[in-house]
Image: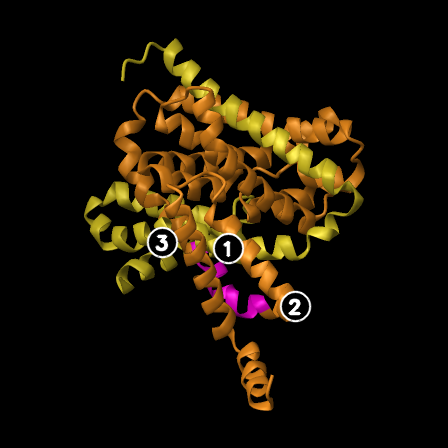
Chain colours: A orange, B yellow
Amino acid sequence: MTPEVIDIWSYLAREPLLWLTVTLLAYLAGDGISRATGRAPLANPVLIAMLLLAGLLQATGTPYADYFEGAQFVHFMLGPATVALAVPLHAALPRLRGLVIPMLGALVAGSVTAIASALLIARALGVEGATLLSLAPKSTTAPVAIGIAESLGGLPTLTAALVILTGIIGAVTVTPLMNALRVRDWRARGFAAGVAAHGIGTARAFQVDATAGAFSGLGMGLNAMLTALLAPWLVAVLI
Amino acid sequence: MIVNIAILLVCQLIGEAAARALDAPVPGPVIGLALLLGALVARPALEPRVAPGANGLLAHLSLLFVPAGVGVVAHLDRLGSEGPALLAALLGSTVVTLAVTAGVFVGLRRLLGATA
């Protein structure tokens, strides 16, 4: 590179503008690929964008902290977006009639399964101690999961990573799994995505169907509250 | 648009303040969600003043997880030697949880003789 190019690069690399712009472009690329494949589950826009960006950070030797200076503006919007879930939920309220018992039953079954199966599978594979405890809240939305991990004696940063990975796994597997199980009810499909895979599952649900998205948001919110209550108790029973 | 965003932020702000003040186990934005839902039920006229911005944000909910996702990929090696076992647990547990949750939902609806 010529000196001027290096000057421009070092200027831009210090500014939030660069990585904010690149984050939006990477997402547009991911979303474009996702649309081009007809929303194929594996062509998940979050997955594509994060792999593109991680490769770019690696290639340019950019530390994650520098990247986050720009990307934090996008990250910040998670809070308002959580509040925004009230709008589709409000629209779905008339359709909740007769669904309260199926929903609460599915919530309790899903919440217990999410915590217990993660702990049992990992323990069978030789995971123990604080690492094992960090798995317990993996299906809940990140801020709740981190709080739960702290109170259980897990590792909050590990939990944050496990939560994101769970979301991606759920978003990628939910459509083929529900088709294989012949679950056609969008409410059941969305609710399961929210309980098992929190916000990333909910983002996937909104891609597929607005009703699925609303029920996914509901599942996510309810599971966050229930996991906070159940996790300490299940950990005490199982471990 | 600005009114939409302002309503969302006001709800979140009250939620965050309440979560801190009450030491609640639920994060501020979730309290904000409940608050906005309550407000929409009480005053349906509020809906058009918040819906366009809210739906616009939710249409691109995926985007908002990208920065955190990049952090996970950048630090994937920190999972260490337990990485494969943890990934297997996440995969197995997530698939089983999806199946159980949807199965119980559909099963209970049939059991209660739902027609719709």
- Residue at image coords 65%, 64%: A58
**Callout 2 crowding tier (Cα within 10 Å): few <14, some 14–19, many ≥20:** few
Q: Distance of mark 3 from mark 1, alpha carbons? A: 18 Å
Say which residue label 3 marks. Answer: B57
Is the residue A204 above or below the residue A175 in the image? below
Magenta segment boundaries in residue numbering? A67-79
Q: Residue A49 carries which label?
A: 1
- Residue at image coords 60%, 83%: A1
Residue type (three-letter) at the residue carrying disc 1: Ala
Q: Position of residue B51 (x, y in %)?
A: 26, 50
Viewer-closest of A57 and A202: A57
Viewer-closest of A165 and A44: A44
Tag 2, which chain?
Answer: A
Say which residue label 2 marks. Answer: A63
Which structural element holds mark 3?
A: helix
Is the residue A97 above or below the residue A174 in the image? above
* B61 horizontally vs A146: left or right: left
Tag 1, which chain?
Answer: A
